[in-house]
Image: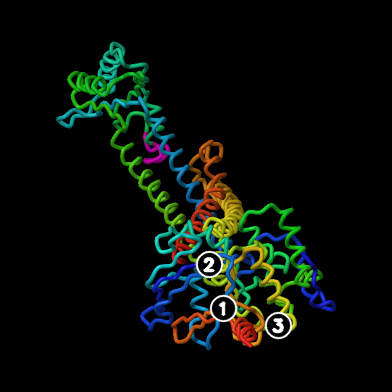
Amino acid sequence: MKVIPLHKKEKTLGKVYGKRRYDLPLNNNANSRFLVILIGLMSFLATLGLSAFFTLGAMSQRWISGLENNLTLEIPAETSEGRLLSLDEMNNLTQAAASILTSYPDVARYNVMDREEIQNLVEPWLGKGALSADSFPLPGLISIKVKDQASRQSVESLAKKIEDTIPGARLDTHESWLKDVLRFTNALRFSTTVLLTVIAVTTVIAVAGAVNASLSAHHTDVELLHLMGAADSYISRQFQRHALLLGLAGSAAGAMIGLLGVTAIDWLAGEMEIYTSPQQYTSLPQTIGTAMVPAVIALLAMATARQTVLHELAKMP
Amino acid sequence: MIRFEHVGLRYGIGPEVLSDINITLAPGSFHFLTGPSGAGKTSLMNLMYLGRMPTRGLVTMFGQNINKMKRQDMVAIRQRIGVVFQDFRLLNHMSTFDNVALPLRIAGKPEKEIQNNVRELLEWVGLGEHMNVLPNTMSGGQQQRIAIARAVVTRPRLLLADEPTGNLDDEIGERLLGLFEQLNRMGTTLVIATHNQMLMDKFPHPRLILSKGHLTIEESKFNLRKKLEGLF
């Protein structure tokens, strides 16, 4: 091809340095900063929410495992007529209960609690020294550990056998108490799941809004690429990559601050003696879950950008 | 190459800006598109580069019925078309080089090939020393040359140019028409929209004349003059 110089004395102005990174000037956009801050906030909240989710899970698991296979046999301190039992009568009933437990195959071990142990249990409610040696009637308590394979029917059969022998005796499986606590922790866990969903939805809406604003701002350029024969995927890749990078920057910073926040809350809880779960950070699922927050949010931002751009491009012929 | 049968175009619920257009442009042909302002030249070009779909009629391009074509299949058709827009539509955040290289990058050409082709072409249009310059710092004429270089860099089978010489002086305009002629000789089909009567008179190509949305075809005055000269 023959070279025809049209203008020889033109000046070189506005030189461009550096490599071409985008066909569209997506970085020169005020939306980008807004999006990074918003994604950072969402990531911060997600880290806190996820931490709460795992902590509640660990707490309920700890309670379950602490009470699993444990029963408490309570022998009332008075008869059904309201007469207080003497110490000897109480010892006899306790011995009778112990012999049933010894002969019962599904009982792994049991411990007849002495008066001092029982006093220690009720002390937090009644105060130290409130119970003098024999002045206050105390029920007989036996803590029982049943074997792992013990069925519900077996425990019910034991309860009936004890009740037949010792009228008024009650075998407490802790089930009703545990049910309430588990219902409460499950409700809290459900709330954190809702919170995490709201965070995800907010992120999607914010990214879609920012991408739409960006598409409007660069509509002429996007249309030009389209008319030059750029496939939808070629154009959407530019927005996807941009959203991924912004998402990673924002969510990494947000998750980092979130982790610091969780550490601070944990420290404060320890200081105020409301420490709840001793293994908050050592659980593997929580470590993996928290580490994945930036990646998940960034990928969510990328997928949203892709869908938003493809949806808009579909309106072009 | 291009076939329009009873094609009409209206924007929204407005009147038809193009009515009953019937044309067939053979492969390798060269046509000027002319007519008064507001006659529908840009709208017709828009239909030709698939910027819009007609509201009625049949459009066939490269032997394929556009009306029945899937969106994703139009990508390949668009990559065979080069367009010089009236307002250039250059990307001002990109250097001259990158603007011209863009269609090749979109087509997925290797970077080495892009480097060679774009440099050669920019030298050819006299912008060899301005490869790293942003377009918005350049004159209208220079920007127009970038737009032309970008349109021809892929050696398109169809080149559509909307007032490509509007910002150029006559001498440069003629040189660029020479470039279009050269492309045409290499097999590219051309449609050049222009108001420049003198320029059209210098080239022996038929004219598509648009008036109030209706299209007529007129033989070149250059050819008529030659015929008349032959008679006497």
How many angstroms separate mark 3 from mark 2 (CA)? Answer: 29 Å
Mark 1 or mark 2: name the one nearer the start of the chain.
2
Quadrant in the picture for the C terminus of chain B? bottom right
How many angstroms separate mark 3 from mark 1 (CA)? Answer: 23 Å
Q: Position of residue A196 (x, y in %)?
A: 45, 52
Bounds of the magenta span?
A123-131
At label 1, counting other C-alpha atoms closer than 10 Å, the crowd grade (few under 14, some 14-19, many 20 or more) is some
Task: Name the residue type under label 3.
Answer: Leu
- Element at badge 1? loop
Q: Mark 3 belongs to which subunit?
A: B
Q: Please indicate whether residue A137 sits to the left or right of residue B189 in the image.
A: left
- Element at badge 3? loop
| Residue B143 colored in magenta in the image | no
In the rendered image, the vertical position of residue B195 relative to residue A317, given as above or below = below
Mark 3 or mark 1: name the one nearer the start of the chain.
3
Front label number (3 vs 2):
2
In the rendered image, the vertical position of residue A157 relative to residue B172, given as above or below = above
At 80% from the left and 72% from the top, the residue drawn is: A4
Read off the residue under disc 2.
B26
